[in-house]
Image (cartoon, helix red, strand yellow):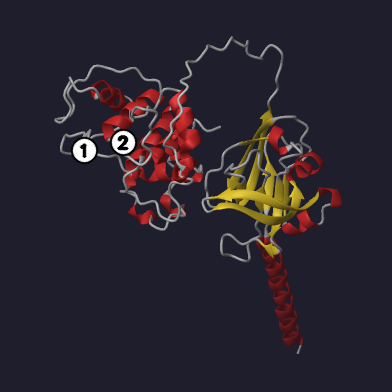
Amino acid sequence: MFNRKLKLVTLVLAMVLILSQGVVLAENAEGFAVEIVGEGVETELKLSLADLKAMPEEAQINEEYIYNSKGGEKSALVKGVSLAYVLKEKAGVTAENAEVLFEASDGYPIDPQTLEDIFNEDLKFVLAYEINGEVIDNDDDPDNEEIVIYRKLKEPGEFGTVYKMVVKITVGEAIEATEDEKPVEEEPKPEEVKDIVFTDITAEYEFAARAIDELAKKGIIDGIGNNKYAPEKEFTRAQFCKIMVEALGYDKVEYTGEFTDVKAEDWFAPYVQAAINNGLFTGYTDGTFRPDQPIIRQEIAAVAGRAAVIAEIVPQAKMDKFVMEKSNFADKDLIPDWAENEVAWLEAQGVFENVATDNFEPEKIVNRAEAAVIVYNALFQE
């Protein structure tokens, strides 16, 4: 009898132990929505949705946020907590400025932010836990707690103000500005401004008017004479090669005979050589450059993306992280491997706005209006 009672007690204790372990495992699996770390914080945080919702009223934000997507301007009713409040009041951040990195759970690259922007009351960065009255679920796993960070627009038409699936925020060391470190301001060099008014930019091509005007003032693009730009016509590969060499400020160089269809006496030969030397353009496997062939979308995207790297607008390592799997283009599978990083990055920056919408159409010939928009948006838009 004693042995039977002992076995029963042992069994009960074992079950209690197993159940208690199960509770601990369940609590550990519950996890958190976002963590805040880095050299710039006094207290590192791991915050759940319940933590965010429990913060005081002055921390809460419940407002409409306007943002831009490839489909145009949109709005969302955003409910969440002020990121500035969390950093100052909970994480103990005292610096006025530092680099702040947002890390997405799927590894999608997000441009570094600044404390100066986050603390800017007009921008109102928010750790959102509800969008339009619904709990967020961008990873198709309802068991995972998620936030999305929104901020207000700095200027109309701005892209990149919504940051999805952020799981980690890293605040770097304070950036201290001293009088000694301030650069000596040099007198600006006068730029030659061409006062050109094109009379054939009709309502159909109004979307490209600013890009055409700005590139013309910089001497990067020209009209066809008689104050005409001919926005509906195309650029050949040779013509676009000249544009990109001019845009990056390269000098023309002597042609060394790389291609069977480019001769040293051709007007475009020095531009082709400069573009090849700097990795902007490539030829074809048959040894031709095809200078008179109209340039198509996948080619112009590859060149514009390479130019953005050369101009130090984006590092090559970051460009390489952009892939077509995350593209919104319905025909993204048609993008060739040699252009996919550039197309994906340009799309994420809003470069193709008013040029490509539902489909990218990689082999479509680019007209002169579209080409101006792509070059301007990729290299000169602030």
Between 330 and 233, the residue placed more toward the observer is 233
The residue drawn where x is 73% and y is 83% is: 8
Q: Residues within 10 Å of mark 2 (few under 14, many from 20)?
A: many
Amino acid residing under circle 1: Tyr
- Circle 1 — which element? loop
Q: What numbered label is drawn on residue 235?
A: 2
- The answer to whether residue 315 shows anywhere in this view is no
Residue 360, labelled with which disc? none
Q: CA distance from mark 1 to mark 2?
A: 18 Å
- Could you say which quadrant of the image residue 146 lies in? bottom right
Residue nearest the viewer, comparing 89 with 128 = 128
Q: Quadrant of the C terminus?
A: top right
Q: Residue furthest bottom?
A: 1
Residue 152 spot, x, y in % from top left:
68, 44
**Which of 92/154 is in front?**
154
Amino acid type of disc 2? Phe
Q: Quadrant of the N terminus?
A: bottom right
Q: Is residue 27 above or below residue 169?
A: below
| Residue marked by disc 1 | 284
